[in-house]
Image (cartoon, rainbow, N blue to C red):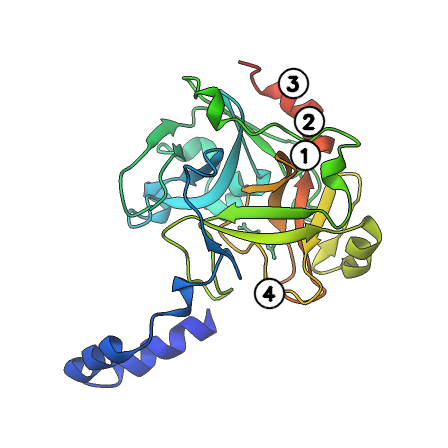
């Protein structure tokens, strides 16, 4: 946040005409070619299973009210992070958010493309505890089924998609710089699934959190630079054509040695089967 305020104050300190000239001669902002963090632009048609969670009442109208991501895992089932629907994020209980929506097929949040589904049937994992961060999953059931082309299959226990070193992609409309620069169009970043020992060494249990291999998976690059960030939560981590994780937490964004931590899909699949819909 601090980084984003400095240029704003600088602009306010000069007369309007000068400020305008400054804007006009400035090179394109770094956000134009950077990602989730360190990513690239991708279109929702290439990743139709990525959805945006929205509430204009809580988050405003400019970016369609987007505040988290999600993934379509059956024609009527969308997964997101439990923490996305917490009081800490919404400032109230999710039941009090009257315009909670799942937005499908809207590449640019400033536009109106795609379809908005009211998120009326919601199950938030009651076992999710913010301090532990384990079991960070919620299930939203859509009132009308999406075509099967929107469905991303969930990775199962022992899936080769969890092989350490495998290339994975994370998708979202979240912060592209780690400073509150939220994307308007969908981004993706390429990372690698890391082995549990590396994840546990990065997060042995401090204020930042503790890595729990049973319910989490972590991914990143040794030198950092590519990662999910604020606003990407609940969105998909995809490897081998399957959903392996949901963006959950991390220390900073894209920091070397501090990989992104994701809800391990194979671990929560039974909960999804019990609380989602197979249609
Ligand atoms: N908790 C964040 C959110 O609500 C996601 C953080 C992910 N951080 C990371 N470094 N991968 O959007």
| Secondary structure category for the residue under label 3 | helix
At a point 63% along the width and 31% down the height, the residue shown is: 125
Which residue is more in the foreground, 91 or 55?
55
Residue 225 percent across, percent down from the top left: 59, 65
* Residue that carries the numbered disc 4 in the rendered image: 225
3D distance between C-alphas at marks 2 and 1: 6 Å
Q: Which mark is residue 277?
A: none
Direction from residue 67 to residue 56 in the image, left or right: left
> Counting other residues with Cα less than 10 Å from the Cα at mark 1, is it few (<14), some (14-19), or many (20 or more)?
many
* Residue that carries the numbered disc 2 in the rendered image: 269
Please, is residue 235 above or below residue 226 in the view? Answer: above
* Residue that carries the numbered disc 1 in the rendered image: 265
Q: Quadrant of residue 58?
A: top left
> Counting other residues with Cα less than 10 Å from the Cα at mark 2, is it few (<14), some (14-19), or many (20 or more)?
some
Is residue 129 something one can see in this rendering? Answer: no
Query: Which label's residue is closer to the chain start, 2 or 4?
Result: 4
3D distance between C-alphas at marks 1 and 4: 24 Å
Residue 273 percent across, percent down from the top left: 65, 20
């Amino acid at each position: 946040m601090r980084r984003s305020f400095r240029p704003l104050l600088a602009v306010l300190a000069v007369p309007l005409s000068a400020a305008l000239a400054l804007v006009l001669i400035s090179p394109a902002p770094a956000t134009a070619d950077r990602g989730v963090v360190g990513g690239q632009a991708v279109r929702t048609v290439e990743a139709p299973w990525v959805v945006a969670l929205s509430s204009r009442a809580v988050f405003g109208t400019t970016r369609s009210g987007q505040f988290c991501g999600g993934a379509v895992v059956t024609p009527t089932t969308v997964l997101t992070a439990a923490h996305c629907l917490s009081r800490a994020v919404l400032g109230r209980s999710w039941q009090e958010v009257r315009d909670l929506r799942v937005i499908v097929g809207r590449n640019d949040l400033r536009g109106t493309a795609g379809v908005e589904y009211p998120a009326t049937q919601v199950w938030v994992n009651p076992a999710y505890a913010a301090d532990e961060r384990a079991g960070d999953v919620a299930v939203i059931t859509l009132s009308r089924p999406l075509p099967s082309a929107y469905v991303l299959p969930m990775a199962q226990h022992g899936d080769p998609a969890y092989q350490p070193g495998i290339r994975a992609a994370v998708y979202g409309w979240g912060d592209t710089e780690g400073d509150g620069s939220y994307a308007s169009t969908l981004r993706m970043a390429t990372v690698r699934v890391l082995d549990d020992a590396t994840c546990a060494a990065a997060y042995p249990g401090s204020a930042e959190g503790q890595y729990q291999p049973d319910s989490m998976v972590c991914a990143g690059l040794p030198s950092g630079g590519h990662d999910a960030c604020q606003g990407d939560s609940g969105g998909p981590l995809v490897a081998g054509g399957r959903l392996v994780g949901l963006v959950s937490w991390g220390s900073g964004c894209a920091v070397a040695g501090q990989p992104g931590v994701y809800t391990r899909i194979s671990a929560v699949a039974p909960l999804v089967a019990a609380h989602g819909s197979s249609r």
